[in-house]
Amino acid sequence: MKDILIITGGSNGLGKAIVDYLQDKDIIICNLDKEKSARNNANYKEFIGDISYETFVESSIHEVAHLGNIKYLINNAGEPSFKLPSEYHKEDVDICFKGLQGMILCSANTLRVKKEQDLKIVNIMSSASLRGNKQESVYCAVKWGERGYTESLKVAYKGTSVKVIGVYPGGMNTDFYKNSRDYVSQDKQNTFMNPNEVAKIICDSLFSDLNLTVADIIIERN
């Protein structure tokens, strides 16, 4: 039975870089995303929908389970909203919280399908999970929530065959900031990390043959 990797948000940004890095791996890559990519690969499957919708996540993961052995789950999807604290409205909050909801729904459903055994969960968050930022109050609140969820998973499955890795990257040169040019200019973005290099660090840790598990990865630009 072929091993399967599920990734959310694999159609662009860091998610796409991870999928590109894994294209030569002998695994089936299943991308849960609301956007369709241009990829055409026999080992690549797409499920188009919103990961904050429970019915989409549950049905997709059950379908994926019939393709092979779900071995890896990379929770990567998320959307930002960068504003001063007084400028936030409910729609901004809802946008940010979709990533946290998706992380929980995808993890819970995959754990149920796998009967809480033999699974590596990688939660890709942000350096915003580690500190507060002036124009990221709601985004930081969500990322701190994701970090709390990740740490709780580690405690829940300590000593089992379920391994949990928390990843905290700083700013990357992707279109993540395309709607926030008043906050991050294109020139500033161009000084950020290369997503392909970040993807390599994550994947090399995930697929290490060493008898150990990297629990946390903090990646900052020089």
Image (tube, rainbow, N blue to C red):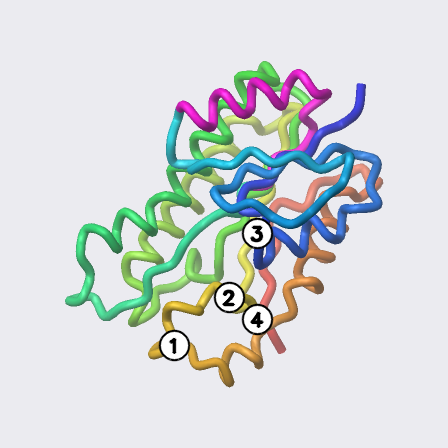
Q: Which residue is mark 3?
A: 167
Kind of residue indicated by mark 3: Val
Asked if residue 2 is positioned above or below residue 211 in the image, the reply reads above
Q: Which residue is mark 1?
A: 181
| Badge 4 vs badge 2, beta-carbon distance below 8 Å | no
Q: Residues within 10 Å of mark 2 (few under 14, many from 20)?
A: few
Q: Which residue is mark 2?
A: 175
Q: Quadrant of residue 160?
A: top right
Q: Secondary structure at mark 3?
A: strand
Q: Earlier in the sequence, mark 2 or mark 1?
A: 2
Q: Residues within 10 Å of mark 4 (few under 14, many from 20)?
A: some
The quadrant of the rendering that contains the C terminus is bottom right
Foreground residue among 125 and 60: 60
| Badge 3 vs badge 1, beta-carbon distance below 8 Å | no
Kind of residue indicated by mark 1: Arg
Kind of residue indicated by mark 4: Asn
* Marks 3/1: CA–CA distance: 25 Å
Foreground residue among 166 and 182: 182
| Badge 3 vs badge 2, beta-carbon distance below 8 Å | no
Q: Which residue is mark 4?
A: 173
* Marks 4/2: CA–CA distance: 7 Å
Q: Report the number of discs.
A: 4
